[in-house]
Amino acid sequence: MTVKNAECISIHKNHWLLYFLRLLFSVKSSIQYDYGSFQNIFIQFPSSLMNSIATEPIFISLAVFASLYIFIFYGLRFWFRRASMDIGSVALSVSQIPILIIAILSFFKIALAQLKSTSIITWVERGLTAVIVITVTYWVAQLLNEVVVYALKQFAQTSEAQWDDVIIPIMESSLPIVIYVIGGVLSLQAIKIDLTGLWVAVGGAAFILGFALQNILADFFSGLVLLIDTPFRFGDVITLADGTKSVIKKVGLRVTNLYVFNQHCELYVPNSALHRQQILNLSRPTSHYYYTLNVPVTSDADPARVIQLMQAVVLAHPDTLGLIDQKLEFLDQLYGMSGDPVRVEHKRQAGHQRLSAEKKLNTQLMKIEQAFDSLSNKISYLEKGGLDANEIRRMQGDFLEICQMIGMDTMSNLMTKRRRALLEEAQDKVGEEKLIGLIRQWYSFWLKDPDLLPEDYEILPKQWEQKIEFLKRKVNKLFRKFSNPSGDETRLDDAVMQISSWMRENFKTTRNQWQEPKIWLSEVREGMSKNFSVKFYVDDITLEHFERGNRVESEVNRELAWQLRRAYLSL
C-alpha cells in the first residue's frame, strides 16, 4: 500500500470510527496483515486524527471511566477487605464484569450513533441495547441474591421478629424470577418486537389461572396471615388438632413443612388448613413442657409420706425443673438407683456441674433484674419534677453499673470517640464472672450431658449465643437513649422496664415456684389403691431430637417405681 493510497482516505474529526474501519479494510485487502506494511501505515497516520482523539468527548469519557473503574474495583476492594463484613467486597466482585460489559457495549453504541444511519446499523444498535438490558438484568439478580438477600439473612439471625424468617426465603426464590421476566420483556422491546398480543394472552391466562388456582391462592394468603399472627416460630414444637406432635421446619408459599419426630417423617400441611385448626404450641412461652404421670400405691400408704418421697425422686433427676438447692441435695441421694452405675455417675457429675453453674447464673440474673427495677423506680420518682443534667448523669452512672454486671462496657477506641459511644462485651477475666460469661459457663457444662446428641452440641450454643446477641443489642439501644435523651428522659423508666420484662420472659427465667413438681392424690379406691398424679417440667424438650421429654418421663417413672417398691408402697 503506497503513501498515496493511505492519504486518499479522507479524515474528519467526528468520523474517527469510519476512518478506523476503512483503515482495517485497507490493511486486510492490500497487505494481508504483513507486520512491516502495517507499521508503515501507522507511521503515516495523519496527525489530524491524533488531534481529534485528544479532543473527542468519547475518548475523554473513556479515560474517566477507566480511572473510576480502577479506583472502584481495585482501590475500594482493598478498603472493603479490611471491613468486618464482606458485603462490600462481594458487591464489587459481582459488579465488576457486568459493569465492564455494559460500558464497552455503551461505547460501541455511542460510536455507531456517529455513523450514517442504515438498516444494518439500526439493527446492530437495537441488538446492543438488548444485550445491555440482559446484562443489567443479570447484574441486578446477582446483587439481589449475593448481597441483599445475604445481608437480610444475617439480619434475620440477630432479629427476634419472625416475619423475616419467612419473607427472606420467599424473596430469594421469587424475586429473581420477576427480575428475569422484566429483563426479558425489556430486551424484546429494545429490538422493537410488538408485545401487544403477548400482554393480551398473559392477561387472559392470568384470569383463567386465578380462577383455577383459587385454592393455592387461599393457601398463599393464609401463609401471610400466619406470618403476621406468628402463632409459632421455626423450631417450635406444636400439637395439631389430631394430637400429632411435630416441629415447625418451614413456612412456604403454599404449605408448611412439619417434622413428626415420633414417626421420623415430614408432614406437609396446606397453609389454609393449618390456619383453620387449633394449634397447641408446646414451646411457648418457654420450651419447658409439663409431663404427668399416674402412679398407684397401696391403699394403706400415708399420703404425706408418699408425696414427700415422690417429690424428692422427681427433684433428684437433673433434667427436671425445681429449686436448685433441693435438686443438688436429692441428686446425690436418690438419682439413678435403678440405672447403670457408670452412666448414672457420669450423668450425676455433669448434672451437678450444670446445676451449680445455673445457681450462680440465676443469682447474677436476679441482681440485674432488681437493679433494673430499682433504676426504673428511681427514674419514675425523679421525672415528676423533670430530670435535670445532674440527675441524668446519675441515672447514666447507675445504668453503666448494670451494664458492667451484664458484662458490657464502653468502647475506648478513637473511632468510637469521634462518632458515638457503644457498649461491647468485656474480654477480660472479670467478664467471665458477669452475666454473659456465666451463661457461657452454664451451657458449656450442659454440653457435658451424656444424653445429648451430636446435633445438640450445635443447637445449644447457637440458641444461647443468639439470645446473648439480642441482649447486647437491646442494652446498646437503651444505652443510646441514656447517652442522648433528647426529650425522651420522661420515658426512660418505660424503656428500662421493657428490657427487664424481656429478660424475665424471653431471655432466661430464674427458677419459679410454678415450675416445682406437683404431687396430688387424685383417686382413692377403698381397700385397693390410692392413685397419685405426678406433674413436673422438663428443662428443654427440643434437645435430643425432641425426645428428651420422653426419656426423662420414662426415667422418672422407673425411679418412682423403684423407690416405692423399696419403701414397700407400690402395688
Image (spheres, grey):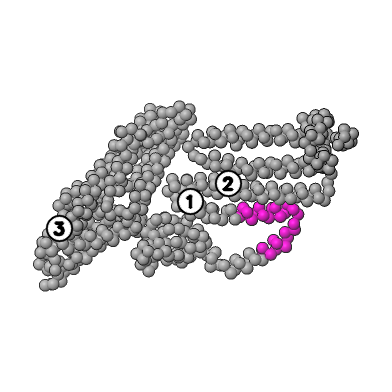
- Residue under label 1: 164
Is residue 261 visible to the viewer in this orientation of the structure?
Answer: yes
What are the residue bounds of the magenta stretch? 178-203
The answer to whether 166 is drawn above or below residue 370 in the figure is below
Question: Disc 1 on helix, strand or loop?
Answer: helix
Residue 58: percent from left, percent from top: 75, 36
Dominant secondary structure, magenta: helix
**Which amino acid type is shown beneath numbered disc 3?**
Leu
Spatial CA distance of label 2 from label 1 is 19 Å
Count residues near mark 3 (Cα–Cα under 10 Å), then give few for <14, some for 14-19, many for 20+.
some
Which circle marks residue 309 in the picture? 3
Which circle marks residue 143 in the picture? 2
Question: Disc 3 on helix, strand or loop?
Answer: helix
Residue beneath the point at 74% across and 34% down = 59
Residue 108: percent from left, percent from top: 74, 42
Q: Nearer the viewer, mark 2 or mark 1?
A: 2
In-front residue for pair 393/559: 559
Assign the N terminus to one quadrant of the image: top right
Disc 1 + disc 3, Cβ < 8 Å: no
Question: Disc 2 on helix, strand or loop?
Answer: helix
